[in-house]
């Protein structure tokens, strides 16, 4: 989705009308992000040093323009939205913005010198960092009446600057995603190298980008907010049932498939989906609780046997 946005923005910035032009940009950008992920953690670290300030500059800049457009905070609160979203659906979508990153947090925190440093970094990143980004995005969308970032920048006449900042932001995010995809693929396949999986994941994303997948961002985030949180519930429940007393020797973990984890995960996803469809409570939280309790109960029973 991010690659598609960059391709469309670039075409708009330079006035390219050919359908091939944004597609070629998408391929080039994907290759750059893939190389960053292949280089490893150090490559992503240096990209983050550059892109993180760009993200903050862009967020504060657009927010300031948005407040100026509506006459400050008082004017912002006087705006009556023309469309609405149920509270439950909104929470699910917001959770989806960082749920997948949350499950991959261990990929980054494992490099921390101390456990305390890892906890502080996660707190700053998810609670403050992601919270601010959601807040800035909400202010801008409310003020300008446009939730699509690409269309918003076009209407404001800031395609060039928007492209510069947007690329810095999405370069980091996509490189991180490609790296996480490679690590997960190598773990699942019990392979020693993650490189082939990084290349495969980038290839899939590059094929989807020209097809306009970025137009389905809200539905995608909602789906992620349903499918990912139960993973956390399973991890917590399994830890309480089996790992609280210490980690057993890896040689004792011989199960190829652990149904005591799969069944609670599926149950959590079903409950989260039903909750989201019928606005019953908070869908992600419901999924987490069901998966957690199920993994804990089944893990304790398996241990007793």
Image: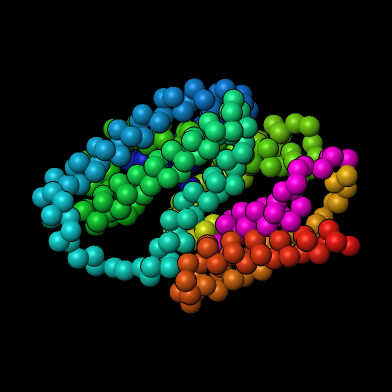
81 part of magenta stretch: no
**Colour setup of the view:** rainbow
Drawn side of residue 32 relative to residue 194, left or right? left
* Figure quadrant of the C terminus: bottom right
Q: Is residue 249 magenta?
A: yes
Give whichever of 261, 117 is nearer the camera.
117
Query: In this orientation, which residue lies closer to the viewer: 277 or 264?
Result: 264
Classify residue 288 by image quadrant: bottom right
In the image, taking residue 230 as reference, residue 249 lies left or right, namely right
At horizontal 82% and vertical 55% (from top left) the residue drawn is: 257
Q: Position of residue 33 (x, y in %)?
A: 54, 32
Left or right of residue 175: residue 94: left
**Quarter where residue 63 is shown:** top left
Regarding residue 212, the answer to whether it shows in the image is no
View extreme (front): residue: 245
Tell which residue pokes out farthest to the left in this image.
71
Q: Is residue 91 visible?
A: yes
Q: Residue at x 47, y 67 (%)?
A: 282
In the image, residue 208 sits, relative to residue 123, either above or below, namely: below
> Vertical placement of 208 versus 167: above or below?
below
Identify the residue shown where x is 36% and y is 49%: 134
Q: Position of residue 192 (x, y in %)?
A: 78, 32
Q: Measured from the top left, where is residue 95 in percent x and y?
A: 47, 55
User: Where 143 falls versus 106 (above or below)?
Assistant: below
Q: Main secondary structure of the magenta part?
A: helix
As rendered, which of 157 and 170 lies closer to the eye?
170
Give the total number of marks visible in the rendering.
0
Q: Residue at x 84, y 39 (%)?
A: 249
Q: Position of residue 39 (x, y in %)?
A: 61, 24
Q: Which residues are magenta?
A: 226-251
């Amino acid at each position: 989705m991010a690659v598609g946005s960059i391709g469309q923005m670039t075409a708009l910035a330079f006035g390219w009308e050919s359908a091939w032009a944004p597609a070629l940009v998408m391929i080039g950008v994907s290759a750059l992000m893939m190389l960053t992920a292949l280089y490893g953690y150090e490559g992503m670290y240096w990209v983050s040093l550059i892109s993180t300030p760009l993200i903050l500059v862009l967020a504060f800049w657009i927010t300031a323009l948005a407040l100026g457009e509506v006459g400050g905070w008082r004017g912002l609160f006087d705006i009556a939205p023309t469309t609405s979203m149920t509270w439950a659906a909104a929470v699910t979508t917001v959770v989806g913005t960082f749920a997948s990153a949350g499950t991959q947090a261990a990929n980054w925190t494992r490099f921390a010198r101390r456990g305390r440093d890892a906890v502080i970094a996660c707190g700053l990143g998810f609670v403050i960092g992601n919270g601010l980004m959601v807040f800035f995005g909400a202010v801008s969308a409310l003020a300008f009446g446009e939730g699509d970032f690409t269309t918003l920048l076009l209407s404001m006449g800031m395609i060039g600057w928007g492209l510069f900042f947007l690329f810095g932001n999405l370069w980091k995010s996509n490189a991180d995603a490609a790296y996480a995809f490679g690590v997960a693929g190598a773990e699942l396949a019990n392979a020693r190298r993650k490189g082939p999986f990084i290349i495969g994941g980038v290839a899939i994303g590059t094929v989807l980008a020209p097809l306009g997948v970025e137009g389905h961002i809200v539905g995608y985030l909602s789906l992620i907010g349903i499918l990912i949180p139960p993973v956390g519930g399973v991890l917590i429940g399994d830890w309480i049932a089996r790992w609280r007393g210490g980690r057993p020797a890896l040689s004792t973990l011989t199960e190829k498939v652990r149904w005591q984890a799969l069944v609670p995960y599926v149950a959590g996803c079903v409950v989260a989906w039903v909750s989201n469809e019928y606005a019953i409570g908070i869908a992600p939280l419901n999924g987490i609780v069901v998966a957690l309790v199920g993994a804990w109960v089944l893990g304790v029973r398996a241990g007793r046997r």
